[in-house]
Image (cartoon, rainbow, N blue to C red):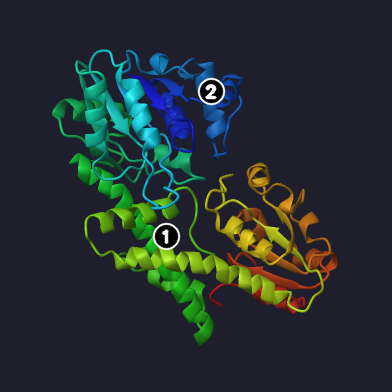
Amino acid sequence: MKIGIIGTGYVGLPTGVGLAELGNDVVCIDREPQKIDVLKAGKITLYEDGLEELFHKNVKEGRLHFTTSMQEGVENADLVIIAVGTPPHPVTKEADMKYIHAAATELAVYLNGYTVVATKSTVPVGTGDDIEALIKKKNPFADFDVVSLPEFLREGFAVHDFFHPDRIVVGANTEKAKNVIRELYKPFEGQTQMLFVKRRSSETIKYASNAFLAIKIHYINEMANFCEKTGADIDEVSRGMGLDTRIGNRFLNAGPGYGGSCFPKDTMAMAFMARQNDVDMTLIDAAITGNTARKKEMAERILKAVKGIENPKIAVLGLAFKNGTDDCRESPAMDIIAELLENKANITAYDPKAMGTACYLLGDKIEYADSMYQVLQDADVLAILTEWDEFRKLDLEKATELMRHKNIIDCRNLLDGEKARSLGFNYKGIGK
């Protein structure tokens, strides 16, 4: 199948590589010449575990191409996938649709023969109708269908999730479009469930899923606060809850709050759509408010640990919003650092993958270390903000030799608290 993908970000690029690996001829389109030049030169523009190897393989085998030309990617394509950003509007926090509308308008003139146009971006309910109208207005003779094809790729696990999907949701209003998507995902036949629904239902499923998971994270963080007051252990409570199949054990890890490119913007967009339709969604509103407060609370815990120390040095492990990615968008770590900087904190940080991204965002506001041990040198408190596996292996005895004061705020519960305390650390985890 000939496929054009508009957008080469954390959704578009892994999707393009995955579809090429399935044997399709894929052209990835991006309006940024610099990004396309880098991809054409054989260099990957984001980090995802396992992505680089498949990227090089499919470029070499001639199934994966890159261009700034919409015509080159869309003309003669069987399927065009829109995977551009829908960032929150700076005032209303609704999804900003300018990139979606621009892509739909531009691609319309190059449609040649029957084409399925699929939205893989997370878009408000009714966007498929809008795209359909835009294309018809620009090209009244185009033979096409618009489908909703929401992505469910976890950052850090995008390659795994592409090839092992929990489900494939398709919002299609015609049998002809359904048959194209069936053919696209034929390699997964018998491995996962393909759910065909109305287009507006598909658009809602994505928002409903992300909002529910955000609420689940907020709930376990509130429960962690309860455990701290009552002497219970949140890890034990989470395990006990997760054994109930009605609840499940995923997204029950207490921490500094949810972040990333999806949950923050999608909960705000869902709340906006609810207000537009005069629907009360108090759970989502509470999760948004509570998550913002959560990150401020984490910063306060870190500052409290160095209260009374003159010009304290704060060591931060973790800048990405989660392990497995270099993405710092809406990262709790970055928000916590911003709060610390408001309090004139002296910060040195390290992350195994996100140093470049963080440096681009923070510049010289903080110092950057080359390793997790360098970051500890003369530190007065260590704050662990991202759950990278290598941080679990931190040598606490070595840390005692490097740090000036032995304070640890473990916002991810990665370290052995009992061992840390036995070595003289003032160790505080989450929900302990």
Q: In which quadrant of the rendered view does residue 80 lie?
A: top left
Label 2 secondary element: helix
Residue drawn where x is 50% and y is 69% of the image: 293
In the rendered image, residue 228, in percent from the top left (x then y), is placed at 53, 81
Residue marked by disc 2:
57
Q: Is residue 132 left or right of residue 412?
A: left
**Residue that badge 1 annotates:** 250
Q: Nearest the camera: 37 or 228?
A: 37
Asked which quadrant contains residue 134, the reply is: top left
Q: Residues within 10 Å of mark 2 (few under 14, many from 20)?
A: some
Q: Tell me the quadrant of the picture where the N terminus can be found.
A: top left
Q: For this view, does 413 lie left or right of residue 130?
A: right
Foreground of the two, 158 or 173? 173
Q: Quadrant of the C terminus?
A: bottom right
Q: Percent from the top left, x then y, of residue 136?
A: 21, 23
Question: Label 1 sits on what residue type?
Answer: Arg
- In the image, is residue 23 above or below residue 414? above
The residue lying at 32 percent from left, 13 percent from top is 76
Judge whether 222 appears above or below 60 on screen.
below
